[in-house]
Image: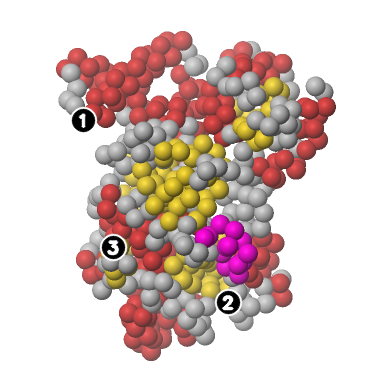
């Protein structure tokens, strides 16, 4: 069982299905997954989950799916997603996740580029579009629908029908499925994960069983998660961060509860009461903005809140050092928790041991705020190409404003230009069908060029300062890192939703700013202004409030970094309009093109 790589790296499993089989043998009757159906939360055990995955493998083989072929999963998180993922691998195939929010004209590129022959899909409208545009995905032989209301034909099949085929033929293929678990090698491809394409055409990242299982072992070695933890997962499984959660999950034997949707997370948190919550910075920013807005509505509330934060900060220092709290401080903290922090904890389910943040940089100010409130956010760092983590803060070792220390088998060095370069068993094989792009960032001796700029601090913690491609070089030749400035502006006011700093080859930096509509309307009510959002976004009152924030941030910046002008964009950026990736990162290129006239105007009027 397992393998040893180069005498150093020991992987106790042959492949990903072997890991899941081991978990079934260890705790067959323990709950593996929970999901909400018809208003009630339902559970499935490890044994029943794995049996259904074998049924999927049986159906695939029976319908002609061959070893090494690709099958796409085009859906939001649900039980069937992971059943199909493991089923594809049990059949000897390669899974290709696709973001459920992608329109067909974008998803068809991934389906065709990966040469997928099966597509498992959730959206009825997308399924009907695929049916009507069958010629645009010529290699696909079957669409398997998770929506049971679709009409079946020779191309589209309901998942229940598909599973029926698998159950009826399982005895024929059980040995082949078992043999696959023995035969699939660590270096075989497990999945093709397409980058979200913030700057261009998505690239299929080739991730092997070794990539994922080495990551599983590195995270398992930290022992931050324990077997009775409950994880609420809303991050799309098409993203590498969530995929890591999927595969680490059986190693610890924890329960994963699937959030109904991103919009239902707030509702699902108290229902599930998770102990671990993986998320992206945008969610923490929204919680922070809401809390700030609530307390700033009343001078008395704000005074109590500020006092509670000071107490929480003192307590945090003792906890970092592992020291017992003095009696008087302990008493003050109990009062602060009852008056202020308990409300925040309750909103988040009441049992959170820690959050995990990834996917984009987290503001140090927000991380420190949560810590003072008694909630620890462990920020990590990685990319799809690093499957996915490079470094992570841990319960025992964490420092806000950093992304932690490198994982045990990952080598990290900082190139002369400040770029972070990494090597390890988690580094992907390259890009599917893209040898030129692979050669540009994957070196022959195993190093991967991340495109991120960073540095190590005196204690060995890694700090990310910006994306290499996002660095702004002003017309005066000065380099500006936009993300820290953007995060500072967002953290200063609940009115602000998104910020994009611009200034590449320009004489100075400017910004596009979007607003939180609910907070703008609250602000209007508190000032006795007309509650008309369209009028408010162009009002002097709102402009002056944003100007105050920009001025405050500018005080701490070098003159060439300061924001000389800004424009308020009436509509917020969304995934649906193509401004954000499915993990809520801003697509700079899209926004620069969309608002080119507004940007040019800020420079022409100087």
Q: Position of residue 164 (x, y in %)?
A: 44, 79
Mark identifier at residue 322: 1
Dots 3, 1 in contact, CB < 8 A: no
Q: CA distance from mark 2 to mark 1?
A: 55 Å
Dots 2, 1 in contact, CB < 8 A: no
Q: Secondary structure at mark 2?
A: strand
Side of 368 relative to 252 (left or right): right
Side of 578 relative to 495 (left or right): right
Q: Position of residue 585 (x, y in %)?
A: 57, 43
Q: Disc 3 or 1, which lies upstream in sequence?
A: 3
Marks 3 and 1: which is nearer the front?
3
Mark identifier at residue 117: 2
Q: Is residue 145 visible?
A: no
Which one is nearer the viewer's eye here, 63 or 568?
Answer: 568
**582 w.r.t. 495: above or below:** below
Q: Disc 2 or 1, which lies upstream in sequence?
A: 2
Q: Is residue 437 magenta?
A: yes
Q: Which residues are magenta?
A: 431-443
Say which quarter of the image contains residue 175: bottom left
Residue indicated by mark 3:
8
């Amino acid at each position: 069982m397992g393998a040893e790589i180069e005498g150093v790296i020991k992987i106790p499993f042959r492949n990903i299905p072997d890991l899941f089989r081991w978990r079934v043998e260890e705790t067959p009757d323990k709950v593996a997954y929970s999901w909400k159906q018809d208003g009630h939360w339902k559970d499935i055990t490890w044994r029943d989950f794995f049996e259904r995955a074998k049924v999927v493998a049986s159906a695939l083989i029976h319908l002609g799916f061959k070893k090494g072929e690709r099958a796409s999963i085009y859906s939001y998180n649900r039980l069937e997603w992971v059943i199909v993922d493991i089923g594809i691998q049990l059949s000897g195939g390669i899974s290709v996740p696709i973001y459920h929010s992608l329109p067909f004209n974008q998803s068809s590129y991934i389906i065709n580029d990966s040469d997928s022959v099966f597509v498992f899909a959730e959206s009825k409208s997308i399924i009907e579009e695929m049916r009507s545009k069958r010629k645009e995905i010529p290699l696909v032989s079957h669409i398997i629908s998770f929506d049971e209301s679709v009409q079946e034909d020779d191309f589209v099949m309901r998942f229940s029908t598909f599973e029926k085929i698998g159950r009826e033929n399982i005895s024929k293929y059980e040995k082949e499925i078992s043999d696959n678990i023995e035969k699939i090698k660590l270096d075989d491809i497990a999945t093709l994960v397409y980058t979200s394409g913030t700057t261009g055409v998505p690239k299929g990242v080739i991730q092997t069983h070794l990539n994922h299982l080495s990551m599983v072992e590195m995270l398992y070695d930290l022992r931050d998660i324990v077997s009775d933890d409950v994880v609420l997962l809303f991050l799309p499984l098409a993203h590498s961060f969530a995929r890591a959660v999927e595969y680490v999950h059986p190693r610890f034997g924890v329960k994963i509860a699937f959030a109904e949707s991103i919009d239902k997370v707030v509702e699902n948190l108290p229902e599930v009461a998770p102990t671990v919550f993986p998320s992206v910075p945008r969610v923490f920013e929204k919680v922070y903005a809401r809390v700030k807005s609530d307390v700033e509505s009343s001078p008395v509330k704000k005074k109590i809140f500020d006092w509670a934060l000071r107490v929480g900060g003192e307590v945090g220092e003792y906890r970092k050092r592992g020291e017992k709290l003095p009696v008087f401080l302990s008493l003050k903290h109990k009062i602060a928790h009852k008056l202020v922090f308990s409300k925040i904890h309750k909103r988040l389910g009441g049992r959170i041991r820690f959050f995990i943040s990834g996917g984009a940089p987290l503001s140090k100010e927000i991380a420190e705020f949560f810590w003072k409130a008694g909630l620890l956010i462990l920020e990590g760092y990685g990319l799809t190409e690093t499957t996915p983590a490079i470094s992570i803060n841990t319960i025992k070792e964490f420092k806000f404003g950093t992304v932690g220390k490198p994982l045990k088998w990952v080598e990290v060095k900082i190139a002369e230009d400040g770029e972070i370069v990494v090597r390890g068993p988690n580094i992907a094989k390259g890009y599917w069908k893209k040898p030129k792009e692979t050669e540009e960032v994957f070196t022959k001796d195993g190093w991967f060029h991340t495109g991120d700029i960073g540095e190590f601090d005196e204690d060995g913690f890694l700090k990310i300062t910006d994306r290499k491609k996002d660095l702004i070089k002003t017309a005066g030749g000065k380099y500006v890192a936009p993300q820290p400035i953007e995060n500072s502006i967002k953290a200063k006011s609940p009115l602000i939703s998104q910020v994009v700093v611009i200034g590449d080859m320009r004489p100075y930096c400017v910004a596009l700013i979007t607003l939180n509509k609910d907070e703008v309307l609250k602000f209007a009510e508190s000032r006795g202004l007309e509650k008309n959002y369209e009028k408010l976004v162009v009002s002097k009152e709102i402009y002056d409030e944003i100007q105050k924030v920009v001025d405050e941030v500018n005080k701490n910046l070098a003159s060439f970094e300061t924001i000389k002008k800004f424009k308020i964009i009436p509509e917020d950026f969304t995934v649906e309009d193509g401004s954000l990736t499915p993990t809520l990162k801003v697509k700079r290129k899209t926004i620069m093109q969309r608002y080119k006239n507004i940007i040019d105007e800020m420079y022409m009027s100087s």
